[in-house]
Amino acid sequence: MNTINAPTHARRWSAVAAACALTAGPVALAGAGPAHATEGHGHASASVLRTDLDVSLLNKSVQVPLTVSLNEVEAPRSARKTALTATLDGVDHGKPFSVLSAGTADAVATVEGDTAEASTTLADARLHVPGLPLLSLVELEALSSKAVCEAGKSPHASVTLPAAVTVLGKRVALSAGGPTHVEVPGVGAVRLDLSQTETTSATAAATALRLEVSVNPANLNVAEVEGRLTLAESRCETPAAAEEESEAAAPETPADEDAAVEPQGARAETNLAETGGDSATPYVAAGAVALLAAGGGAVLVSRRGRRN
């Protein structure tokens, strides 16, 4: 009896476990996925000075490029160097010469949270080109630029200029109405483009001063200097706003399917409890009937033998 009850008891627990698993399965599938946020980085950059000049030499039919920058940074950085020197082969025997000297020359670029910002400040500055060591190309008191890009707001760009600057030794009043042209006989010409700002739906750019230069020093082996210089430039790009994205939850099993699952397990447990048997029960019953029939036949034959 014990050898029969042990597997029967185990099969009962297996049926109960299967019923529980079928019931709990839809609950586990119905759980929602984790939410996560994505955020764009944005961008900000600033520079106090960038040069793009071609220097023609007297004793050679060649042009030497002068491409340098001062305090050119990208977020998250800042720089406050106040002087820039350079050297060019063939210019003053390769000795260093001053490109820019200033009392203040700051460039700052940051991206924090949903705001990207860049700014530059230049004050008490003197700008030089090769071949004119004693005469400043430009002298200015102060100028600045700023660009701010904040998520959810329109980008903003602004410039602050002095009332006047000195170009090739000449004092020149600045006007926002258009470019300013300065010519000095025997030296050259300079065009000043002032206060250039540009904004889009996601970017902003501000340039305080851009110089188009064409001078003829005829000194220190320099025949001509042409090109562009850019002062106090700031740029930014708006960071993307944080967005939450939830994964789609797996569809829940319909209520009628849940109802169909649970009774199956319940009935399996109930049947086992009522009969105390297993899947072999029908065969045992059939065998018992066969034995009864065989026994009855044997008794009948025995009785007939006695009568005979």
Image (cartoon, helix red, strand yellow):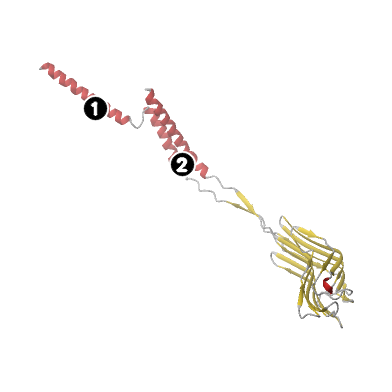
Quarter of image, res 136: bottom right
Q: Nearer the viewer, residue 54 or 10?
A: 54
Name which of mark 1 and mark 2 comes first in the sequence. 2
Between circles 1 and 2, the one closer to the viewer is 1
Q: Tell me the amino acid under the disc marked 2.
A: Asp
Asked if residue 178 shows in the view, the reply is no
Q: Nearer the viewer, residue 308 or 32?
A: 308
Position of the N terminus, as image quadrant, is: top left
Q: Secondary structure at mark 2?
A: helix
Determine which residue is flagged by label 2: 258
Q: Secondary structure at mark 1?
A: helix
Quarter of image, res 108: bottom right
**On the picture, is 19 further left or further right than 60?**
left
Q: Tell me the amino acid under the disc marked 1.
A: Ala
Answer above or below: position of 89 versus 33. Answer: below
**On the picture, is 135 further left or further right than 70?**
right
Q: Residues within 10 Å of mark 1 (few under 14, many from 20)?
A: few
Answer above or below: position of 123 versus 92. Answer: above
User: Residue shown at 27%/28% (left/top)?
Assistant: 287
Query: In the image as oriented, which residue stretches furthest toward the bottom?
Result: 185
Q: Nearer the viewer, residue 114 or 91?
A: 91
Determine which residue is flagged by label 1: 290
Question: Which percent across, then down, holds residue 91?
Answer: 82, 74
Question: Which percent across, then down, holds residue 254?
Answer: 47, 45
Asked if residue 272 shows in the view, the reply is yes
How far separated are the C-alphas under marks 1 and 2? Answer: 44 Å
